[in-house]
Amino acid sequence: MREDVWLGERLGRPAFTLDDADDPSATVDAGFYQAKVACEAVGRVHALEAAGFRVVDVGVTLRREPAPLAGPEAIEVSGPHASERAAVLEIAEQGFSRSRFHLDPEIGADTAAAIKRDWGAALFDGARGERFLVARSAGAVVGFIGLLAGPVIDLIAVRANARGRGAGRALVAECADARVTVGTQVANTGALRFYERLGFETVAATYVLHLHRA
């Protein structure tokens, strides 16, 4: 069992991640616990549920093989400027509604939004990830992407009033020359359609379970 100090600080209580070999009955201390289980491991899901865990999300992992991909010319993508930090954090805070934190009824909407905002800040500041890019339309920031090694899309978001105009496509195009992986939620049907249009294919699915122990 691994403690997630970063997440615990944002939830205001200790946070822990259970690996596949961890005994769910060991979750006796107060705090937040999370686990991800392959959908085919039904027995593991039942054991976690017996210990009080509840499914809050079904995660989907998608992968795209290297292939040319171009975004619209009207969208400029490059590294961020220091002056764009506030715009990025605003997009991160407002750009999500179906993450596992938003879907968990025991985590408030403000807390879920703050987690995404701080996640975006860590990527922008270089404290997390390997590469961070912003998308601009007419000079204004309309989206961003943070990449981990792999590459893996760690976080991507587009401002609500700019969606459907190619910013997301332009951001993904920046890593289209490599095999790229991304995760999203079954509940996020818009994201699934977006990735499928760009040539991503589903390669795995996992249950995400949370336990809040007082």
Image (spheres, helix red, strand yellow):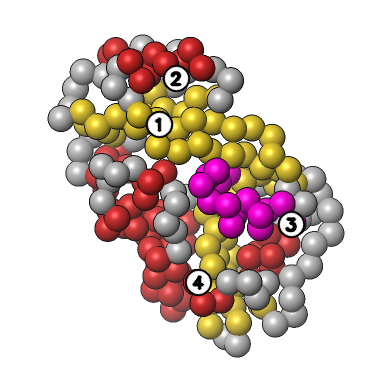
Query: Distance of mark 4 from mark 3, alpha carbons?
Result: 19 Å
Question: How far is the residue under mark 2 from the one under mark 1?
Answer: 9 Å
Question: Judging from the image, what secondary structure is the residue with disc 2 in?
Answer: helix
Q: Which residue is mark 4?
A: 159
Labelled pair 3, 2 in contact (Cβ < 8 Å): no
The answer to which quarter of the image holds residue 166 is bottom right
Q: Position of residue 207 (x, y in %)?
A: 49, 30
Q: Is residue 42 above or below residue 133?
A: above
Task: Find residue 45 and name its label.
Answer: 2
Which of the marked residues, 4 or 3, is nearer the chain's N terminus? 4
Q: Earlier in the sequence, mark 2 or mark 1?
A: 2
Question: Disc 4 marks which amino acid?
Answer: Arg
Give the magenta range.
Answer: 183-198
Q: Amino acid at mark 3?
A: Arg
Where's residue 1, x and y in %?
36, 21
- Circle 1 is placed at which residue position? 55
Q: Which residue is mark 3?
A: 197
Q: Quadrant of residue 33?
A: top left
Give the Cα distance between marks 3 and 1.
28 Å
Task: Residue 6: give x, y in percent of width and height.
Answer: 32, 43
Q: Secondary structure at mark 3?
A: helix
**Above or below 96: residue 187:** above
How many other residues sit within 10 Å of disc 3, few (<14), some (14-19) or many (≥20)? few
Identify the mark nearer the N-term, 3 or 2.
Answer: 2
Between the C-alphas of marks 1 and 4, the distance is: 29 Å
Amino acid bearing label 1: Val
Q: Secondary structure at mark 1?
A: strand
Q: Is residue 193 magenta?
A: yes
From what the image shows, is residue 3 above or below residue 171?
above
> Do the residues under discs 2 and 1 have CB atoms within 8 angstroms?
yes
**Number of marks drawn:** 4
Q: Which mark is residue 107?
A: none
